[in-house]
Amino acid sequence: AHGRVGRVSLALDAASGIARLVLRNRPHANALSSSMMVDLSEAIDRLEQWDAGAAVVLSGEGGTFCAGAALNDGALSSAEMGALFSGLMSESLTRLRRLPLVSVAAIDGAAIGGGAELATATDWRLLAPGARVQFVQARMGVSTGWGG
């Protein structure tokens, strides 16, 4: 799509019952753009319908888990669109939490802000040496926007 920044990929392995959900926005520390937020919601739709599934592993590419929302995404810059996407993410994280699959966040590098909220929506969090999870919202003077 025109102007698309990053993507969320989902690979389902029917033999093992393990899904891989990967955040792919390397130049921006895997920050979630508006299009990635839609990708994530659609991936969760597929996981909710996946009868062969046993587990889902969520990770970010390139040594960083997720830096939260892509604040430079023009689609997120107005109050109305920000509220719309915040609602979508809150709903997505609730749905992720409720999946009938074991969910694991494989955290390499940083899970910051909304990335920390995303990590806490999984059943288990595995951190690589040197990885960190930071809720930076309070320092920024904002509340957790996605219900984390």
Image: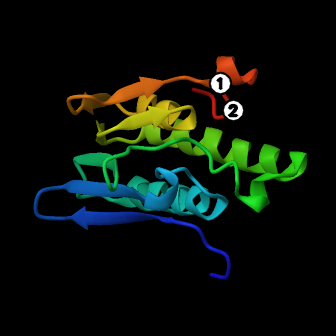
The numbered dot on residue 74 is: none
> Mark 1: few, some, or many residues within 10 Å (few <14, many ≥20)?
some
Q: Is residue 91 above or below residue 18?
A: above
**What colour scheme was applied to this rendering of the protein?**
rainbow
Q: Residue furthest top?
A: 138
In the image, 12 versus 77, the foreground residue is 77
Which image quadrant is residue 73 in? bottom right
Which residue is identified by label 2?
Answer: 145
Q: Is residue 25 visible?
A: no
Please name the amino acid that badge 1 sits on: Gln
Which image quadrant is residue 19 in? bottom left
Q: Secondary structure at mark 1?
A: helix
Residue 45 coordinates in the image, percent (x, y): 49, 58
Please name the amino acid that badge 2 sits on: Gly
Whether residues under marks 1 and 2 lie with C-beta atoms below 8 angstroms apart, the answer is yes
| Mark 1 to mark 2 CA distance (whole Å) | 9 Å
Q: Is residue 52 visible?
A: yes
Residue 80 coordinates in the image, percent (x, y): 88, 49
Q: Is 51 displayed left or right of 36 in the figure?
A: left
Which residue is located at x 76 percent, y 53 percent? 76
Residue 70 coordinates in the image, percent (x, y): 63, 51
Q: Is 31 displayed left or right of 57 in the figure?
A: right
Which image quadrant is residue 105 in? top left
Which residue is located at x 77 percent, y 60 percent? 75
Image quadrant occupied by the N terminus: bottom right
Lower sequence index among marks 1 and 2:
1
Q: Is 20 displayed left or right of 16 in the figure?
A: right
Q: Is 7 displayed left or right of 76 in the figure?
A: left
In the image, 57 versus 130, the foreground residue is 130
Q: Is residue 21 above or below residue 128?
A: below
The numbered dot on residue 137 is: 1
